[in-house]
Image (spheres, helix red, strand yellow):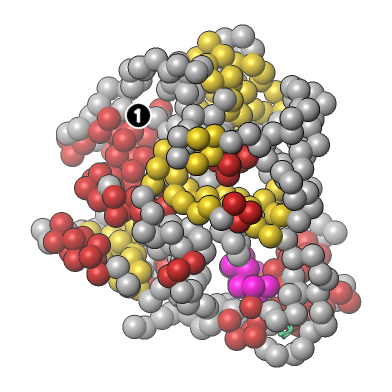
Amino acid sequence: MRRAFPGGLRWPSGGFPYHKRIEPLPRPQDLAVPLWHGGRAEVQPGDRVKPYLLIGYDREGLPVHAPLGGKVSEVGEFPHLLARPKQFDFPRLTVFIDVDRKQSEAALPYRPLPRFWELTHQELCRRLLEAGVMDVCHRDLPRMVIHNALDLEPPLAASLRLLEERTAEVLEGMRIINQLHGAVRSRIALASGFPGLEARLRMMLASSVNLSLHVMDPVYPQGHRTLLKKEIFPGDRCSIYDMTDALRVREAVVLGRPVVESHLTVRNCPVDLCRNVTAPVGTPAGHALWSSGDEARPWRNANHEGRDPPPKLSLPDQAGTLSLIFGGLLSGRGYYSLEMPVQADTRGLLLVEQKRSGPAPCLNCGACHARCPSGLHPSEIRRQVSRLDTKRLAELGLDSCLDCGLCSWVCPSKIELFQQIEVGRMLLGGRL
Ligand code: SF4
Ligand code: SF4
């Protein structure tokens, strides 16, 4: 099977919970729904909210709805400085909701539009905007679309599970997206190795004129936007959506349901748990990591009362030996508090053993270069970062780095090359 990039890595399928059904999480006691810096809240402390009620607007101006019913306990800055300080990506404005133990049945807020093919472009755009899915009202949308079903970064598997479990709904979502784009061609990017799913999709797509399957070599990071475009529509403008996008589009249009939950893979190494779940937006990471089946195990410090002052949350029982990662194992971001909430775009939540020993010297083995899908020389970049040689760094092509994290992963000396590349970018951008 042809591949449009060098290097990469093929993982054993055992590293992914591909076979595990997506289960709903037990209901959390509270939610911290991020509106982010620049967002605007439409509720205040003491307000009661029902599921799907509009509670504010995020930094992009997209409406945000209450995932569950309850009482707003606080509206304000997220209290824990969690993210890597240079990026300021912690959710500033946040609506905290104490979730009702008993949830009342709530009506969906928007009129169902099952005959979506009769809708105009403007009507579709308006619905996706009001449901908080996306704002494409004033965009010139490309006529080529890729529906990305590749889950190739361990252990992320929820996207593929959605396609497997909710095939008809996800395909309907893809058709709505195609209508939105006026797509002349669109492809579902699927990894080889799933013959049952592939056969089912081929059968269901047999009469489609603008939607077909593109089966690919399952080599990480093939699912990266740049590589996907290069492989499927080289030279053309195209947009890329994942399976969660397709499902959300379908739910917003056909059912009138706004975005209130996320589908993600959760791996908790200390308790040997790895599964795919649906979690309400705003669910604390600790709850998602420690609840299992119908059971939600306590994860907050027993002496933690309230949120002010911010609790010094250590990871239960194993302080300092674990890393909390949002995203995949290689390219995910590290955070320092289990209070960090699941967000609408969270695809993975991992608690993994931290490597405690420092890096060994570079062996000049060349593995980082050999695996780099952009053909970069990460060891050389690291060397020039340590010398602060911006002239030489500018020649090393840092802009083509895909942030895949593969160089750090394969390095036998465990050198944090990926982080050094970020430092190199900051040096070049004058941010250090
Ligand atoms: S993170 Fe950048 S430099 Fe490292 S392997 Fe990926 S693309 Fe190459
Ligand atoms: S993989 Fe690690 S040890 Fe090998 S050349 Fe790259 S930085 Fe050096």
Image quadrant in which the C terminus is located? bottom right
Quick check: 142 left or right of 91? left
Q: Is residue 102 above or below residue 341?
A: above
Q: Would you say the beta carbon of the disc 1 residue lies within 8 angstroms of ligand 1?
A: no
Percent x, y of residue 266 = 52, 50
Q: Which residue is the site of mark 1?
A: 257
In reply to whether residue 404 is colored magenta, the answer given is: yes
Q: Is residue 17 above or below residue 117?
A: below
Chain part drawn in magenta: 399-409
Residue drawn at (54%, 29%) of the image: 28
Residue 358 appears in the rendering: yes
Residue drawn at (34%, 83%) of the image: 1
Q: Quadrant of residue 44?
A: top right
| Residue positioned most to the right | 387
Q: In what element is the residue under mark 1? A: loop
Percent x, y of residue 391 = 81, 77
Q: Is residue 408 above or below residue 135?
A: below
Pointer 1 local density, CA inside 10 Å: few below 14, some 14–19, many at least 20: many
Closer-to-camera residue (264/172): 264
Closer-to-camera residue (165/258): 165
Residue drawn at (50%, 35%) of the image: 295
